[in-house]
Amino acid sequence: MGRDDKGSVGFIGIGTMGREMVRNLLKAGHAVHAFDLNEAAVPDVVKEGAVRAQTPADAALGADIVITMLPDTPHVEATINGEDGLLKSPPPGKLVVDMSTISPVAVRRIHADLKRIGVGFIDAPVSGGPVGAKNAALSIMAGGDSGDFARAEPFFRAMGTTITHVGASGAGQTVKLCNQLICGINIQAICEALALGRASGVDLNLLRRVLLGGSAASWMLDKLGPAMIEGDVSAGFRIDLMLKDLRLVQEHAQALNVPLPGTALVTSQYVDARAHGEGTNGNQALFRVYDRMTNQVRD
Ligand code: NAD
């Protein structure tokens, strides 16, 4: 165990989500060694007590657990299999947890590779966005061996409130992909309702408030509805990341011969958004696709 017997963490990926998760691990009393390819990302958490690591192997040195929070599958695979990666230099605590959203197939491959050298691997993607990360209120859906989950759970408690072991390796990612499919299609449904309401001359804030009181209520309508109405496209969860997740959903579904026509349709609209330069905007910017289809010009 690390400082104060709380357990020490090597944390890799200090981005929008990772930086808040590291803050909460520090607040809970864990020692954190932080690594990011972008050096400018690390000082934020060093100011709050984390120690800068030079490589993934350096972050793992002396750690009970290594947590990765990276954009996509290749970034996680590079961290595991790369020259200074965790396969060559695992943490002494013999536990690696990936909290990014990546391919469930890759997860099972990584799980098997690490198991061969006696290291446990948990896939533990999250839901709740940057606000959930900041408030240590993430929903964490974990896949992997029960003993490894039990060892990771105290660390999850520092970052989230709903923590569920959903099954074997890869199951966490499968549940997360189901979550993303619903989020993507739900945003599209909200765009359509707002476009119809706007064309009819209904007050959109009133429309949203009424819908939140009935069976059309949703997290997306609650949290992203105001930004959609105001035309605020600032990013929490970027269009690019949503497209990455919808790609993962479709790859997974195709491998299992499950048709997902709703996902295919909304994906084409996110592609349209990205083609119009919206990739780094928040995913509520999908409403701009509807602005264009209905000839609404906004700044
Ligand atoms: P981000 O792009 O803000 O952060 C990723 C960080 O990883 C960046 O700082 C980047 O420099 C770093 N990085 C990239 N490759 C690296 C490598 N090989 N080694 C070390 N560092 C590397 O992304 P984010 O919004 O924090 O999302 C991270 C993951 O969490 C993604 O898989 C995303 O889908 C998922 N997620 C995001 C949200 C959200 O609302 N932003 C919500 C739930 C889940």
Image (cartoon, helix red, strand yellow):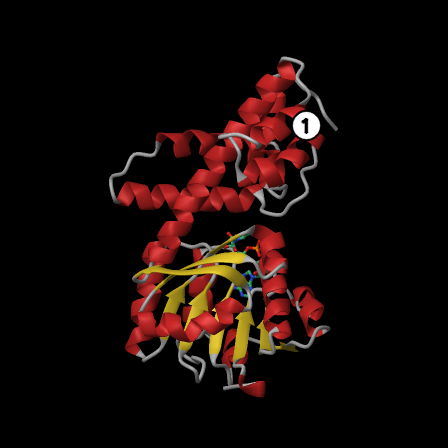
Q: Confirm whether residue 82 shows in the render.
A: no
- Quadrant hosting residue 292: top right
The picture places residue 257, in percent across and down from the top left corner, at 24, 39
The picture places residue 117, in percent across and down from the top left corner, at 32, 79
**Is label 1 in a helix, a strand or a loop?**
helix
In the displayed structure image, the side of residue 13 where residue 198 appears, left or right: right
Residue flagged by tag 1: what amino acid is it? Asn
The picture places residue 18, in percent across and down from the top left corner, at 58, 62
In the foreground, 173 or 209: 209
Q: Relative to residue 152, is residue 180 depicted above or below?
A: above
Which residue is at 60% across, 74% downward? 28
Question: Which quarter of the frame holds ligand 1?
Answer: bottom right
Hey, which residue is sitting farthest left in the picture? 257
Which residue is at 55% across, 29% downward? 190
Q: Relative to residue 252, is residue 47 depicted above or below?
A: below
Q: Label 1, on which residue?
A: 205
Hey, which residue is sitting farthest top in the picture? 200
In the displayed structure image, the side of residue 139 where residue 143 appears, left or right: left
